[in-house]
Amino acid sequence: MPDQPDQSDQPGSPRIEVPGPRRVFANRTLNLRAIQAIGYDMDYTLVHYRVDTWEERAYARLQALLAGDGWPVGGLEFDAGSVIRGLIVDAELGNIVKANRFGYVVRAAHGTRMMEFDEQRSVYLHTPVDLADPRFIFVNTLFSLSETCLYSQLVDLYDDGRLPLINGYEDLFRRVRRRFDEAHVEGTLKAEIVAEPGRFIELDPEAPLALLDQKRAGKRLMLISNAEWTYAREIMRFAFDPFLEPPATWTDLFELVIVGARKPDFFSRQLPLFRIVDPELGLLAPAPGALPGPGAYLGGDATLVEGYLGLSGSQILYVGDHVFADVRMSKASLRWRTALILRELEAELEAIDALAPTEDELARLMAAKEGLERRQRSARLELQRERQAYGERSGSTPAQIEAELEELRARSESLDARIGPLARASAEAFNERWGTPLRAGYDISHLARQIERSADIYTSRVSNLLYATPFAYLRAKRGSMPHD
Ligand SMILES: [Mg+2]
């Protein structure tokens, strides 16, 4: 992934200090001045939730439902560190895996138990992750952490023979998901959040100003969320109104507010549109044909939005946190420019920074190891020619060469003993089990690859655009091949 910082301030101008982890990164060059309209997702994009608090509640709800169905889940507890975004559930085998850019599994757990390297290798050597295969489910939102954690624990119970009515790991996964959806767990939780938003929402006082800057710079702003109107209204009031100058409220920032958007279908299908005629009561009136003007709507689709704005493709930027429903679909169907919000990036970059001395030492030792390997190779060839008496010869006796090889082997082993713990420390940064979301060994992770493919830019939070300013020219780093 590129690591191009956006620090485009002019010499002599007041310098805006951009905290390192809050930079904006570009996969493809994006000139914000050419963007006429910006659409924003709400949940985990404009509004950030305290992940552990939310996921603990979601977990408890699902657990209570399953307990009510007679499942033996009473003793289970949500383990926040057990999963991270970007992992993949292998529902066929009851595994959770992390894959690299090419889909090759680099780490795997069966249920909650991390697999040893040999076991993982024998299971996945010939089975790369393919997200088009329904067997693999991508954990691509923070809303899925509780479900994934519970699934891994249920796999343990299933293996112990304590879920006799379940027919395999895939059946287990589908049943848990269906129960979650049927019970409207997310809806029930949202009622809790509206009642007590301060407990669940992590406020970002800079986000409203970032949007105001964009609006005043002439961008036409839109909120496009799958949430229901009353929920979106309460959450946006709580998260935005305190940071705007009265009488302005959050609705003044947006030319269009579209709730109940049904993304990803919003980007690829034609769906009916309703106008919200009474914002307090949430009363609706059908709005057939076209978007009649600024205001709040329910449903509709991206084609209606483009028609209303008189804009298309590269003039519109969409900002969201869901790799598939927000970013991949708006890019694939409509060629909109795209920005992915990835809050974990801040912790990932901090972990990488803290690791810098370890990585430097690791690189030094790896270079020494390569040097030793070069000498071992040529000594081996020398020995072969000496023994079989052909080609160019060094003049050393086989016994001398063998002694040298022995010494090289001993040095290589002692190097390995120093490399091992450093490599482990590097692999366990951010999360002890899974490492960082965007790296996978020496390669980038499957999540990073999805981001690279679909997101023109990515950053940890919307308010980072405040530092970038609405006038930023976000340059992608030149692509590179190993030979560069
Ligand atoms: Mg979202």
Image (cartoon, rainbow, N blue to C red):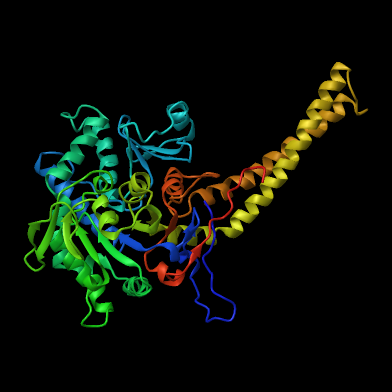
The answer to whether residue 145 is left or right of residue 358 is left
| Residue 160 visible in the displayed image | no
Q: Is residue 37 above or below residue 304?
A: below
Identify the residue at the far top of this view: 388
Classify the position of ligand 1 by quadrant: top left, top right, bottom left or bottom right.
Answer: bottom left
The answer to whether residue 38 is left or right of residue 55 is right
Question: Residue at coordinates 49% horizontally, 57% vertically from top-left?
Answer: 26
The answer to whether residue 145 is left or right of residue 436 is left
Q: Position of residue 456 (x, y in %)?
A: 44, 53
Q: Is residue 481 above or below residue 56?
A: above
Residue 182 in which image quadrant: top left
Question: Residue at coordinates 50% horizontally, 75% vertically from top-left?
Answer: 17
Query: Relative to the observer, which residue lies in front, 360 or 318?
Result: 318
The answer to whether residue 231 is left or right of residue 479 is left
Q: Position of residue 28 (x, y in %)?
A: 49, 53
Residue 343 in which image quadrant: bottom left
Q: Is residue 334 above or below residue 117?
A: below
Q: Position of residue 417 (x, y in %)?
A: 63, 44
| Residue 171 visible in the displayed image | yes
Query: Relative to the observer, which residue lies in front, 320 or 248?
Result: 248
Question: Residue at coordinates 53% horizontally, 69% vertically from top-left?
Answer: 7
**How many discs appear?**
0
Q: Position of residue 96 (x, y in %)?
A: 36, 39
Query: Relative to the observer, which residue lies in front, 6 or 174?
Result: 6
